[in-house]
Image (cartoon, rainbow, N blue to C red):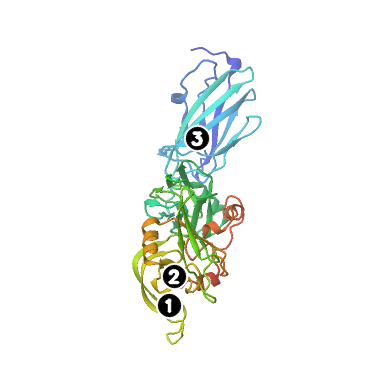
């Protein structure tokens, strides 16, 4: 096929620097001009990685830059993908004279670059460039473990990510966070929050939709995070949500109302924490369920000789904080249920109502306490109090939007006590 010389525009790919005297690893055209007629340029573009008799690969620590040679053509689009289908983010200048990557390349990875160009008279062309990146000899791998275990949860269940290595630097956190993905069907807006250097929580702006499928996965494998720290392989996680079940405990009215898919399905007379042991206000998430659990006053600092001391085998216990707050059967306080608060912080109800509640809720369902004189549920460290941060504050916990706040305070951690009745 013949092309007019006056339409000649070639594409160069330079900037993957190898630490050798030879200098640059470059992608150059074979001199073929771009054309209004389609043609396959992939076979005529080669990555220049030959240095002496050894074949060298591109340095993943270096950015990728693409520019057209000559002054009479411009780049209109660049797509860079690896063998796993991951895209490399980049920016194209307004005049089309330069494209450069804005996200890191992965080590030991094969890349395909597709470049579209346009001549000043409107004729277009395209080039396909392929290259491989090197694997550093000394590196530490960052592992990620998503939680909770796969299964079906309530709409309040956050997704968690535990890192194998602490990540403190904000730039490194941004690389990690941007590669940790959470997708849901139906789709819903959400964000990660850095609880501490090794722990992230992900939640939507509102609760998850009922009967949703939530998938968490990582694109960190092979990506440089920091000095000698690279992303390792991560097992993805898939969760589903059940019905939207929300229990609202009104400590002042001494009643719990349970809603399923926004319709009230039960109203239960209850008792909550008495003066000195007031139940925490705020949104909590079901953490565990035990048909029988022993509760002792000594585990929350009550002396065995105190009039408030207790040692009870409690049935139908639904746990909502790690410090020992439950919704459970309290047959000894049935006369006060619906009228007065007489517990040591838990929400008590009759045996029949507690068994119904136990059978109705699942892990991840929401229990919200209102109108109590107790302290507010802490966002982290005592269960899943994530929903007690409004959306604006939650977003500030992302390394992609703002400075990462501190995790739970020493005072929060000190309040983590076993069981209360």
- Dot 3: element: strand
Image-based side of 254 in relation to 318, left or right: right
Q: Are marks 3 and 1 in contact (CB under 8 Å)?
A: no
Mark sitting on residue 80: 3
Secondary structure beneath dot 2 equals: loop
Q: Which mark is residue 189?
A: none
Q: Which residue was labeled with disc 1?
A: 299
**How far apart are the two marked residues, 3 and 1, measured between alpha carbons?**
58 Å
- Which x, y percent locates residue 113? 49, 32
Instruction: Give how far apart the Cα atoms at labels 2 and 3 are.
Output: 51 Å
Q: Which residue in the rendered view is the most extreme toward the left? A: 291
Q: Is residue 295 visible?
A: yes
Q: Are marks 1 and 2 in contact (CB under 8 Å)?
A: yes
**Viewer-proximal residue among 371 and 398:** 371
Q: Position of residue 126 (x, y in %)?
A: 52, 24
Using the rendered image of the protein, determine whether residue 197 is visible from the camera's viewpoint: no
Circle 1 SS class? helix
Picture disc at residue 324: 2
Q: Residue furthest bottom?
A: 305
Image: 380 above or below 51: below
Q: Quadrant of residue 411?
A: bottom right
Local packing at callout 2 (Cα closer than 10 Å; few below 14, some 14-19, many 20+) is some
Q: Earlier in the sequence, mark 3 or mark 1?
A: 3
Name the residue located 56 percent from the left edge and 57 percent from the top edge.
169
* Residue 170 point in image, percent of width and height: 57, 55
* Sooner in the amino-acid sequence: mark 1 or mark 2: 1
Q: Position of residue 311 (x, y in %)?
A: 38, 79
Above or below, comparing residue 69 to residue 297 in the picture: above
- Rendered-image quadrant of the C terminus: bottom left
Which quarter of the figure has residue 168? bottom right
């Amino acid at each position: 096929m013949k092309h007019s010389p006056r339409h000649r525009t070639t594409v160069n790919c330079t900037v993957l620097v190898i630490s050798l005297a030879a200098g640059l690893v470059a992608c150059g055209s074979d001199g073929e001009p771009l054309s209004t007629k389609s043609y396959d340029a992939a076979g005529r573009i080669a990555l220049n990685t030959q240095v002496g008799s050894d074949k060298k690969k591109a340095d993943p620590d270096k950015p990728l830059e693409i520019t057209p040679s000559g002054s009479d053509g411009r780049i209109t689009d660049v797509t860079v993908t690896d063998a796993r289908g991951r895209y490399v983010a980049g920016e194209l200048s307004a005049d089309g004279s330069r494209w450069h990557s804005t996200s890191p390349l992965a080590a030991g990875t094969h890349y395909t670059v597709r470049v579209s160009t346009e001549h000043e008279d409107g004729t277009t062309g395209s080039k396909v460039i392929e290259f491989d990146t090197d694997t550093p000899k000394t590196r530490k791998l960052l592992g990620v473990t998503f939680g909770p275990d796969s299964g079906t949860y309530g709409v309040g269940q956050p997704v968690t990510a535990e890192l194998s290595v602490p990540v403190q630097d904000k730039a490194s956190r941004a690389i990690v966070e941007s590669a940790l993905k959470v997708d849901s069907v139906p789709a819903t807006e959400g964000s990660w929050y850095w609880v501490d250097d090794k722990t992230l929580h992900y939640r939507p702006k509102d609760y998850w939709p009922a009967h949703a499928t939530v998938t968490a996965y990582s694109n960190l494998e092979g990506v440089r995070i920091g000095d000698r720290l690279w992303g390792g392989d991560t097992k993805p996680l898939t969760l589903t949500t059940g019905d939207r079940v929300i229990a609202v405990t009104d400590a002042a009215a001494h009643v719990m109302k349970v809603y399923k898919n926004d319709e009230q399905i039960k109203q239960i007379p209850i008792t909550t924490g008495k003066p000195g042991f007031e139940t925490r206000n705020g949104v909590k998430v079901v953490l565990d369920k035990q048909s029988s659990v022993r509760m002792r006053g000594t585990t929350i600092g009550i002396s065995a000789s105190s009039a408030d001391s207790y040692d009870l085998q409690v049935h139908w216990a639904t746990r909502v904080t790690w410090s020992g707050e439950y919704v459970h059967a309290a047959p000894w306080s049935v006369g006060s249920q619906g009228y007065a608060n007489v517990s040591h912080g838990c929400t008590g109800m009759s045996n029949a109502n507690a068994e119904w509640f136990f059978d109705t809720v699942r892990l991840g369902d929401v229990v919200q306490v209102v109108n109590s004189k107790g302290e507010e549920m802490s966002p982290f460290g005592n269960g899943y109090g994530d929903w007690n941060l409004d959306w604006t504050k939650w977003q500030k916990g992302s390394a992609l939007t703002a400075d990462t706040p501190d995790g739970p305070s020493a005072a929060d951690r000190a309040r983590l006590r076993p069981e209360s009745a």
